[in-house]
Image (tube, coloured by chain):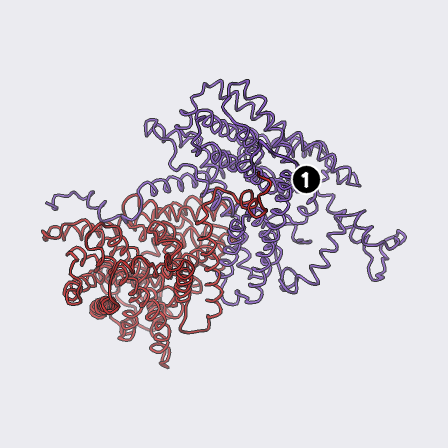
Chain colours: A purple, B red
Amino acid sequence: MEISVPLPTLLLKFGSSSFLNWTTVIALTLFFTLLCACIVIGHLLEENRWANESFTALLLGLCSGVVVLLVTKGKNSHILSFSEELFFIYLLPPIIFNAGFQVKKKQFFRNFSIILLFGALGTLISFCIISLGAFLLFKRIGVSSLKLQDYLAVGAILSATDSVCTLQVLNQDETPLLYSLVFGEGVVNDATSIVLFNAVQTLDFSNIDVLIALKLLGTFLYLFFTSTILGITVGLVSAYVIKTLYFGRHSTDREVAIMMLMAYLSYMLAELASLSGILTVFFCGIVMSHYTWHNVTESSRVTTKHAFATISFIAETFIFLYVGMDALDIDKWKASKSSAARSIGISSTLLALVLVGRAAFVFPLANIANLFRSRSVTKIELRQQFIIWWAGLMRGAVTIALSYNEFAGSSSTATADYALMITSTIIVVLFSTLVFGSVTKPLIEALLFRHSHPVNTDASEIHSLEDLRFLFLENGEPNDESNLPPPPKRSNLSLLIRYPTSTVHYFWRKFDDRYMRPVFGGRGFMPYVPSSPTGAEAGTSSN
Amino acid sequence: MEISVPLPTLLLKFGSSSFLNWTTVIALTLFFTLLCACIVIGHLLEENRWANESFTALLLGLCSGVVVLLVTKGKNSHILSFSEELFFIYLLPPIIFNAGFQVKKKQFFRNFSIILLFGALGTLISFCIISLGAFLLFKRIGVSSLKLQDYLAVGAILSATDSVCTLQVLNQDETPLLYSLVFGEGVVNDATSIVLFNAVQTLDFSNIDVLIALKLLGTFLYLFFTSTILGITVGLVSAYVIKTLYFGRHSTDREVAIMMLMAYLSYMLAELASLSGILTVFFCGIVMSHYTWHNVTESSRVTTKHAFATISFIAETFIFLYVGMDALDIDKWKASKSSAARSIGISSTLLALVLVGRAAFVFPLANIANLFRSRSVTKIELRQQFIIWWAGLMRGAVTIALSYNEFAGSSSTATADYALMITSTIIVVLFSTLVFGSVTKPLIEALLFRHSHPVNTDASEIHSLEDLRFLFLENGEPNDESNLPPPPKRSNLSLLIRYPTSTVHYFWRKFDDRYMRPVFGGRGFMPYVPSSPTGAEAGTSSN
């Protein structure tokens, strides 16, 4: 008889939409509760110099992992297992787009050459050192079943720095030079290490030769340029569409929607064309903040600025929560069949290799770059080099995603060693984020702000503006304010060689004002712009 | 030899993150491109009185369905098959939350009793008529294999009106009374029809009796009140947390993030507790716009107002695109094995039943409601009743989701008839949205705005404010401005009976000012509020 059904059962039957998977609902509820907790706790710890949001999220993730482990009596530790698709399709794009959207473009492009040097050549050096080190050291600890390809994969996996944590630890306003160097490197590094990783997975390394190496280089360059061009193109299309149709006349929501959709579309198009979505969406963000953002209504501007930042913020917190919860994946720990000593041995070897691999390119490359910087104020000081080295030591979700991809799915006989590699990667990620990450802020304060004389991070910018005024006395414009004798009019080429950054910047501005802005809008096209997404710096210039 | 690998293949191997599923990338790229196209085309058709965004999205979805059908040579018509989880977890909650967030609260609560009457009793009447009609008529067309339960399910499925399309067709500022009635009914209707549908799926209707019917009623009431209370509680918690911690001091992004997360959390908590997530998230939206929204910084206010609207807008467009693409699901059409005449017969029967079922409760219930409305200006006129009837005829994604749930998964022998039911439902949804939807706007113009004398939609509001001033002469306050003799001081009870809405409103405002606002913030607590999410009406009152 149906009549005897008690009320709670009736409720369960009638009330809930039976279309929803019960586990999904539980997992999502738990995750959203934890995200709220992260934000509140992160806010309360705001004044604390050691903690940051990543730190809180990781710890909270670990704690809930422990709770789940206790509740399920050791059977299960994570609600959702780490999904590469979730990470690469939904979480990473908004973070990188927002970084491009809010980055101080002038700083970024001034240091473009050194960013490329660090991100591409530096990652390659780090990859070689970590692979070689693992190959030489692992056998002594007792890991013997790995193939040559696996060692190379370890190198690629641990060369991927974590740009998300960097964003939280460094402050764009306080240390703009360091921020743009470390973060810019992180974006290029992401692309490089993913290219390296895919190359390692597909190439037959037993008969490698110069031609393959050259082809690899060619592929990297091709990827870099096409991805960048695609990002710029999508950004310009969005600017043109919004300027031509002028949505704001009718609806703020349409403008915001089209900006969000086009940004995401750039990432998807890049993935569809087998390019680097990370690079594409980053440059799309830069172009959108330079052109599109200035074509929309005032309320659209406020909304996009904060909505992009919020979505990125939620995605970042989500990732760390996720990694923290996933770290206690009990099956992996069991499968590694490893003694604690052996686990610690592998993890600390990997950590040491990460430290050495990064030092091996930061200090030499920074000093090489200094050779080309004429004035002493623009040189990268030793303590700045130290911070660049330190701030790039964190490993994050990209590392975990790559590690799972290499070591989890394969039906190899070396299962125990493969599981050991995954758990060791997790330990490296946790340790580097928790320890290195929490030390970074106090370290920067101790190294940079304790000194009474002003730091040279912003000085370079002022000098470059003076350069511009000083160098380009075009069309016979009198230069009465300067007491110096008017310099001889040099050819563009010689200027380019002597003051490369300023010259490129100057010609870019001329080109931008004459050809780009009339077509794509941007600042100067709209009557009045109170603030720009890059914040305080916008008052002077935004390119 | 690896050397002979051509460049494009190398690119495919190295470039793309191999972690992404190829089909997902293609589907997402296509979807985002189509979404952008919908927005641009919708903008260009803005001035067109017949088209609206749902219309464009549905047609564009149909067209791309045709293209996919041609490209795959008739094998496949849709990129993503309709997923109930995607719809109920990710698309529906932001739409309903935004509706609650932007709804004109005063209008909504003034008509609360009639909204409840329409949404609960009306849906039940419509359910009975459609079920009975289908039971009597289908056998004549040749559909014989359906069970009693299936006919009842058809009634529940086609009683679910589409609040999304209604939102686009009616204008909150032009016809506030109609908007609040039709939309409010839609929200309650969603909850009712889902409860009905679940009841149909689980109950044994061969031995139904009065006790079960009473239990069903009890369940509905329980669901309605607990869902509402949960939504209000989550909203109040968000207001209290933001007011107490005052996030804005530090970060706009945190405030926006916590509002977004708490809103979504309310939906998930309701689903977890087997309540109606739709009702919960709707009331959470109302409470958040009344309290939380006033506790945050100015930029958070602009951001949330537009970001919620944008997300809801994208979700709406996505749903219609999805339904349009899904309509050409070739397997379903083949499985129904039905002649065109039989298909059209079933579909037009269902459409006729929808028309009759809605007429059967709108006109009687509106006239019953008119009996309780004392002044003639607050009565619902016949042409308004006609528009209420017409605007609620659209069927949408909820109908399709329920139809798939009932007829797609089951391993019944009546496969052909079941597939026929799905295709007929799709035809009803397409026809009602495209034809009824596009006629609604011109119909409203023709019926309401052609008349020269002012429409009474807003008149009731002014009268109620006068009521308040006139009726409540509390604490012996002199009423010099009025020439009327001071009315005898009546008891609260007699006021409540004579002027129920105004009295409740008055006491609610007193309670709100004295107890709620000091704890949860809200307007009057913050020094200055330029605009409210409800828009123009905010200047006078927001509750």
Circle 1 is placed at which residue position? A117
Residue B84 shows in the view: yes
- Which residue is the extreme one toward the bottom? B452
| Residue shown at the point (40%, 36%) measured from the top left | A81
The reply, left or right, for residue B58 in relation to residue A349 is left
The reply, left or right, for residue A315 in relation to residue B325 is right
Q: Which amino acid lies under the numbered mark 1 shown in the image of this protein?
A: Leu
Q: Position of residue A356 (x, y in %)?
A: 63, 27
* Quadrant position of the C terminus of chain B in the picture: bottom left
Camera-nearest residue between B347 and A539: B347
Camera-nearest residue between B472 and B447: B447
The reply, left or right, for residue B336 in relation to residue A179 is left
Residue A237, compared with residue B239, is above or below; it is below
Looking at the rendered structure, the number of numbered marks drawn on it comes to 1
Residue B391, compared with residue A28, is above or below; it is below
Q: Position of residue A379 (x, y in %)?
A: 75, 38
Please rate how many residues cluster around mark 1, counting C-alpha atoms within 10 Å: few if below 14, some from 14 to 19, many from 20. Answer: some
Q: Position of residue A447 (x, y in %)?
A: 67, 31
Camera-nearest residue between B51 and B412: B412
Chain bearing mark 1: A
Q: Name the secondary structure under disc 1.
A: helix
The reply, left or right, for residue A127 in relation to residue B308 is right
Camera-nearest residue between B380 and B93: B93
Q: Position of residue A134 (x, y in %)?
A: 57, 25
* Quadrant position of the N terminus of chain B in the picture: top right
Which quadrant holds residue B132? Answer: bottom left
Residue B372 shows in the view: no
